[in-house]
Image: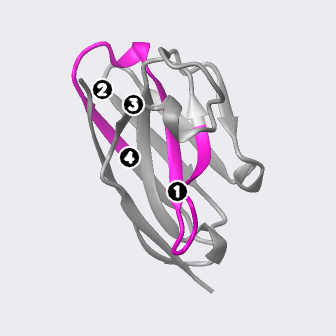
């Protein structure tokens, strides 16, 4: 069992930066792939980024490539999402999620992730 807690959200202007953090409890953090998803008002939750257990492999949705960077510190059981050049369309609740890699399927699908945080709000004003 893994418990995830996000932090770092807030209200910023377009072009600003934010850094989201996800703290994980439980053992074997490095064995989990981790992901960030977001859900904007009136929209379905969507994949943002993913990082392998080792941290060596990352994936991003096209709309954030070059602006967002996912990272993790396995010694501290934490994951981060550095978000630069924020746009109003990045406004959403951001969730971190853990994948024990026991469920097959695309890493962009919610069902692949077994544990979820409560979410943190990011609002970008124009």
The residue where tag 1 is placed is 38
Q: Position of residue 34 (x, y in %)?
A: 48, 30
Residue at position x 24%, y 15% in the image: 27
**Could you tell me which residue is drawn at 46 percent across and 56 percent down?**
94
Q: Nearer the viewer, mark 3 or mark 4?
A: 3
> What is the number of callouts on the image?
4
Report, in whole angstroms, how far the alpha carbon at label 3 lies from the one at label 4: 19 Å
Question: In 3D space, how far apart are the residues under numbered discs 3 and 2 (Cα atoms)?
Answer: 21 Å
Numbered circle sitting on residue 21 = 4
Q: Cβ–Cβ below 8 Å for labels 2 and 4?
A: no
Question: Which of marks 3 and 1 precedes in the sequence?
Answer: 1
Crowd tier of the residue under label 1, counting other residues whose Cα lies within 10 Å: few below 14, some 14–19, many 20 or above: many
Q: Which circle's residue, 2 or 4, is located before the other in the chain? A: 4
**Of marks 1 and 3, the one in the foreground:** 3
Tell me the element at label 2. Answer: loop
Residue 45 inside the magenta-drawn segment: yes
- Is any atom of residue 87 visible in this view? no
User: In this view, which residue lies farthest toward the bottom?
Assistant: 126
Please tell me which of labels 3 and 2 falls first in the chain: 2
Please report contact status of discs 1 and 3: CB closer than 8 Å, yes or no: no
């Amino acid at each position: 069992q893994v418990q995830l807690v996000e932090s770092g959200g807030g209200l910023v202007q377009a072009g600003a930066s934010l850094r989201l953090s996800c703290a994980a409890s439980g053992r074997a953090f490095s064995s989990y792939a981790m992901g960030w998803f977001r859900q904007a008002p009136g929209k379905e939750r969507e994949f943002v980024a993913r990082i392998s257990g080792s941290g060596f492999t990352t994936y991003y949705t096209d709309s954030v490539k070059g602006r967002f960077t996912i990272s993790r510190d396995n010694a501290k059981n934490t994951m981060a999402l550095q978000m630069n050049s924020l746009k109003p369309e990045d406004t959403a609740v951001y969730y971190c999620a853990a994948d024990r890699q026991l469920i097959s399927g695309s890493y962009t699908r919610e069902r692949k992730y077994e544990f979820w945080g409560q979410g943190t709000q990011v609002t970008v004003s124009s």
